[in-house]
Image: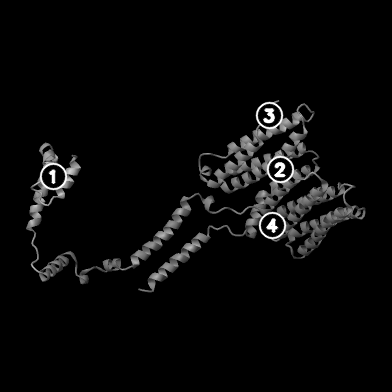
Amino acid sequence: MKIRTPLFLIAFAVISAWASAQNASGPTTAAEHLGLMKSNRKLLEELIEEGVRLGDANTNLERAADCQSVANRLGRELKRAIDLDDADRVVEMSDHFSSLIQSGFLPNLETAKENIPVGSPDYPRLLAIHTTAANSLDAVKLLIPTEGKLSKSLRVQAARIKLEAAAAAVGKPEKE
Amino acid sequence: MKCEACQNRILALEYTPEPTEELREHLASCAACRTAQKKAVKLDALLARLPVPSSQRAKAKLIASLNDQLSVPSSKVPAYRQWMRSPLPGVAALVVLGIGGFFYFSKKQPQPELAEKPRHELLNKELGNVVKLARADSAPDRLRVWTDWATDLRGETRDLYKVAPAEELSSLARMYERAVNEGIVKQATRLPEHMDAEEKQKLLQAADTKLAEGVAEAERLHGEAPPQAQKYLKQMAETSREGRRKLEPILKGV
């Protein structure tokens, strides 16, 4: 009787530790890795094409436009994740989307704005790219639901905030 | 005076039949408090009638007789009740609560908050490379990015060649070919003529070394690869070899 109580407690502790360990995301197995490759294959192939285009782009404006094109592709992936209620994928795509906008698109847009004065031949294109980006960011931001299963995830809520921050950083083009 | 205060003071009286002047004023005008006072008087009278043990011995006898009335002899206690008195039920309840609690919380909470699925490292790297290319405004910078990109694709092939079906391996081989030809080789041909020769040599040499590693690795993996992977590993070895051939004249011209 005296030894049973500590044994019960030890068994309980072991079971609890094992159960908790089931939730820890460990290293990817070969099967998981292959699953990721299969689900991302098309996106990876398209990114190579976009990369080649970016490598050929000679101006900040072209690079901003290419970034916008990649962002649109990620936006489609985000939409698909939302349709599937896949919170992890929503967060992943939102992270990539906001990182691309903040670190790729925005610096090129800012430099282009400095180099392209109002009234210059490239200005209408600059304005168009900025407007498209702002509209697309607004659309992507609204994709993240505020109701339902996904909206309850704290990480999805954080993803939405990130996208809002990216949208705020890009802003709307100033009117002439 | 409020009724609550009045009734509290009545209970605190030494002798309830004789309230203080202040209480009497309130009792004169409050029927509820008068009733409360009557009850208190009655309770005092009943308490006075309770038998008081005449000695310590009599007191002990009274307590023992009260205990006998309250308890049941242990020989008559059923087995399940004896078990209930042991510490086991407490431990069992703790175990059940612990396990139940775990399952309850793991099911009730949104699952993604507990277990984040692993992300695809290659996708992370490719998007990182896209951002780097977006910031790179010179051929040398782009050449560095493409050299890394091709190496990442090679790493993915190395991780998956034993388990991936032909479709995925074919895709990796195609992407590698694009990264080598449209990335490394194209940017190498665009390196500026006025670029520092030593730096240029170093850059080209780094790309060439990675391609040479690509040849060696693909040939090594080919030897132990399953049949569906051999064709694509051979293709990747050839892509690397061809890339080196194209870099050679540029390297010589430095």
> Are there few (<14), some (14-19), or many (20+) residues within 10 Å of tag 4?
many
Say yes or no: labels 1 and 4 on the same chain: yes
The chain holding disc 1 is B
* Residues at circles 3 and 4 in contact by the CB criterion of under 8 Å: no
The chain holding disc 4 is B
Residue A110 placement, left or right of B105: right
Q: Quadrant of residue B52?
A: bottom left
Give the labeled residue for mark 3: A174
Give the labeled residue for mark 4: B164
Q: In what quadrant of the picture does the N terminus of chain B appear?
A: top left
Q: Nearer the viewer, residue B2 or B212?
A: B2
Q: Select label 3 or label 4 by which is in front.
A: 3
* Residues at circles 4 and 2 in contact by the CB criterion of under 8 Å: no
Q: Nearer the viewer, residue B152 or B43?
A: B43
Separation of marks 3 and 4 at Cα, in angstroms: 51 Å
Say yes or no: labels 2 and 1 on the same chain: no
Give the labeled residue for mark 2: A104
